[in-house]
Amino acid sequence: MNIPPHKDIAASAPDQIVEIQGSPTKLIGVLIGSILFALIYARLAFGYVSIPANKEYAIYGYGFGVLFFGAIIAITIKRLLSAPKAIITLSPAGYHDTRVSERPIPWEAIREILIWKMHSQRVIVLKVPPEVEASIGLTPIARWTRGGNAKFGADGLSTVANGLNISHDDLLAAIASRATAATAIRKSA
């Protein structure tokens, strides 16, 4: 079942399956911003604007900006093409963010839910045992960014509401309510 973003999914029954889709409007905003930044960096890298004295460093730095925003453009286009599909699924089996893992994270495996903030970005960090993390099949992006995120303070599996048809607060409430329900069931058994 796909519950609209304005409805309180945190109050949904734990046995109910909730699918959260990508928001094409938000993704188009990301795409436009990335294209603009890639063009700005390209313009700087290819000398259309005067470059500081350390020209070689500037060219490499601006070239990296072109590659970085080019990658963001590619990822955003891929997500735009798959926007009607469920990106996050909340089910009795667990929390499944297709951007993070191939299989759901079992609710009872979530040991802690943290919020990590950097600048204006808020990230939900799910702490799970290493054997669970190894068993869910992390996506390449999740594997590559895992160590760097940990060094910045987001030590766990990171998920965001960016580009989705749900707010950060609603997603956090839904995860917390289902993980809490699973923990209560585990303790009573």
Image: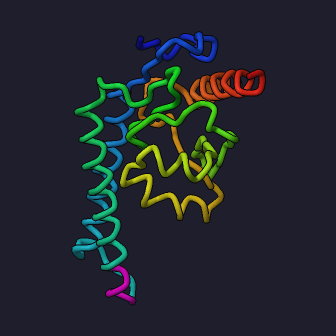
Q: Is residue 76 above or below residue 4?
A: below
Report the magenta residues as a range: 54-58
Q: Position of residue 90 (x, y in %)?
A: 50, 23
Residue 68 in which image quadrant: bottom left
- Residue 1 at x, y percent in the picture: 41, 11
Q: Is residue 70 above or below residue 55?
A: above
Q: In screen coordinates, is 6 left or right of 180? A: left
* Residue at 71 percent of width and 26 percent of height: 186
Determine the image quadrant of residue 180.
Answer: top right
Residue 54 vertical position relative to residue 147 in the rendered view, above or below: below
Q: Main secondary structure of the magenta part?
A: helix
Residue 177, x across and y down, in percent: 67, 22
Give how far across and how far down residue 135 sits, in percent.
47, 46
Residue 80 within the magenta-colored segment of the rendering? no
Quadrant into which the C terminus falls:
top right
Q: Note whether 89 is above or below 46 in the view shown.
A: above
Q: Residue at x 24, y 76 (%)?
A: 47
Which residue corresponds to the image point at 63% horizontal and 32% vertical from the top-left?
108
127 and 129: which is toward the camera: 129
Please name the residue shown 32% across and 87% down the image: 56
Q: Quadrant of residue 149?
A: bottom right
